[in-house]
């Protein structure tokens, strides 16, 4: 069972309200199932841990309503959100490091915001890495564009160029893991 820190949920709520307004946020909430709607009607502690499924259901409704179902829009929005978040204290961790150091910090950061998820990074030469996540379930497929957006933004901040990513294993394949291949130039 995957859990996520309340700070991430609140960040998603605030991003929707800022980008689309409170009425659109309310429209999203109205489209959720009863249990999920009740979850969003209560205060969410930034330090609390919550079922990741609640955020996934919210994101599914949001993408359906605000992006005509285009799940790839989630990657762009994630990159935008993470860029703002990474301008704070975390930026120094990513800005000064080699890709190896960046991915080490990235793995630590993921574990600070997710419970039940493990990250493994395997380097295949100086400009290529395979990132494997275990713990996510089929219904968490929307994490793929979000994580991809985050990975690309982190590498960009570290100073590498020409970043390319491809999925090696998708969550919805039901193999118990998600796997990306990232290549880049520089550093």
Image (cartoon, grey):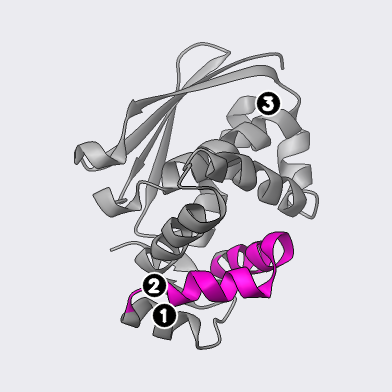
Residue 179 seen in the figure: yes
Q: Are marks 2 and 1 in contact (CB under 8 Å)?
A: yes
Q: Report helix, strand or loop for mark 2.
A: loop
Q: Quadrant of residue 181?
A: top left
Label 2 – label 1 distance at C-alpha: 5 Å
Q: Earlier in the sequence, mark 1 or mark 3?
A: 1
Q: Which residue is mark 1?
A: 37
- Left or right, residue 87 beside residue 49: right
Q: Compare marks 2 and 3 and give the one earlier in the sequence.
A: 2
Which residue is rendered at x = 46% and y = 54% of the image? Answer: 64
Q: Quadrant of residue 144?
A: top left
Q: Residue furthest left?
A: 174
Secondary structure at badge 1 equals helix
Where residue 49 sits, quadrant-wise, is bottom left
Residue at the spot of label 3 = 98
Distance, label 2 to label 3, CA atoms, is 42 Å
Q: Mark 3 packing: few (<14 Cα in 10 Å), some, or many (20+)?
A: some
The circle on residue 32 is 2
| Residue 16, magenta (yes or no) | yes
Q: Which residues are magenta?
A: 9-33
State which mark lies toward you, 2 or 3.
2
Residue 19 placed where, x, y %?
71, 59
Residue sitting at 67 percent across and 74 percent down?
22
Horizontal and vertical percent position of residue 179? 36, 31
Q: For the N terminus, which image quadrant?
A: bottom left
> Percent x, y for residue 182?
51, 22
Mark 3: secondary structure: loop
Identify the residue at horizontal 57%, vertical 14% (top origin): 127
Q: Determine whether, in the image, residue 172 is placed left or right of residue 104.
A: left
Vertical arrangement, residue 15 with respect to residue 177, above or below: below
């Amino acid at each position: 069972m995957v859990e996520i820190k309340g700070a991430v949920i609140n960040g998603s709520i605030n991003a929707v309200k800022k980008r689309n307004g409170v009425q659109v946020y309310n429209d999203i909430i109205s489209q959720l199932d009863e249990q999920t709607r009740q979850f969003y009607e209560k205060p969410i502690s930034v330090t609390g841990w919550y079922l990741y499924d609640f955020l996934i259901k919210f994101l599914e409704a949001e993408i359906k309503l605000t992006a005509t179902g285009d799940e790839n829009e989630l990657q762009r929005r994630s990159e935008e959100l993470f860029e703002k978040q990474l301008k704070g204290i975390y930026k120094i961790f990513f800005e000064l490091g080699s890709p190896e150091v960046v991915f080490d910090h990235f793995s630590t950061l993921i574990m600070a915001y997710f419970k039940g998820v493990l990250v493994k990074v395997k380097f295949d030469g100086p400009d290529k890495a395979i990132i494997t996540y275990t713990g996510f379930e089929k219904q968490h497929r929307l994490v793929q564009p979000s994580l991809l957006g985050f990975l690309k933004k982190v590498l960009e901040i570290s100073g590498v160029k020409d970043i390319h990513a491809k999925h090696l294993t998708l969550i919805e394949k039901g193999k118990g893991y998600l796997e990306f291949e990232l290549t880049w130039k520089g550093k």
